[in-house]
Image (cartoon, helix red, strand yellow):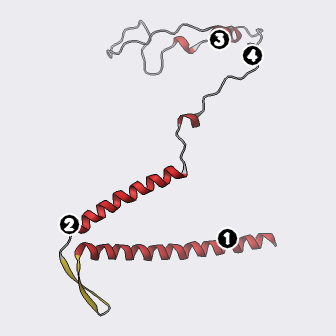
Amino acid sequence: MSTGNYPSAGQPEPGTGNHAGIPSAPARTPSPADSTADSALTRPDAAPPASTGTPAPQPSAAADQPRVTRAGVVWAAVVAALVLLILLIIFILQNQDQVAVRYFGLEGLVPLGMALFIASVTGGVLVAMAGGARILQLRRNAHRARLRQRK
C-alpha cells in the first residue's frame, strides 16, 4: 500500500491523458522501505521492520518558520515609526497655512498641520491616561482577588 505510485492531490494519474496541458508527474519507484512497509501491511503475521536504534528525524513545523525575536519586533516597530514620521512631516509641510487658534482665552496663529498634530497628540495622551487608569484598576482588582484566595 505504498502511496509513492499515486499522484498528488489534483494531479491526473500517469498515462490517463492530461487534459489541462500539465505534464503528468513521473511515477516514483518504490524504495526498500516501501516494500518492507508493504509486506508488513499485507501479511498480518509479518514482524515489524527492524529499528536501527536511531529514530529518523521528524520534520518540524517550527524549523520551517523563522523565529520571532525581540530584536526583530523592535526593528519592525522602528521601521514603522520612521515611515509614520516621514508621512507626518510631509503632512505638516503641505499644510503650512496659518490658522487662528483660541484655547481658554489664549489666541495665536499656528500652521494648520501643526495645529492638527498638536490636537492628535493631545487626544492620544488622553486615551493613554484613560487606558492607564483602567489597567491600574484591573491590577488592583486582581491583587484583591489573589489576597482573597490565600485566606
Give the vertical position of 58 relative to 16 (above or below): below
Q: State which quarter of the image contains the C terminus.
A: bottom right
Picture coordinates of residue 51, whole percent (x, y)? 75, 16
Q: Name the amino acid type tagged 3.
A: Ala
Disc 3 to disc 4, C-alpha distance:
13 Å
Q: Name the residue under label 4.
A: 52
Mark 1 against mark 4, which lies toward the viewer? 4
Give x and y (percent) for residue 95. 21, 70
The three-letter amino acid code for the residue at tag 4 is: Thr
- According to the image, label 1 marks what residue? 142
Which element carries disc 4, helix, strand or loop? loop
Mark identifier at residue 94: 2
Between 14 and 133, the one lying in front of the other is 133
Q: Residue 93 carries which label?
A: none
Q: Quadrant of residue 4?
A: top right
Of labels 3 and 1, earlier in sequence is: 3
Kindly state the secondary structure of the residue where label 2 is placed. Answer: helix
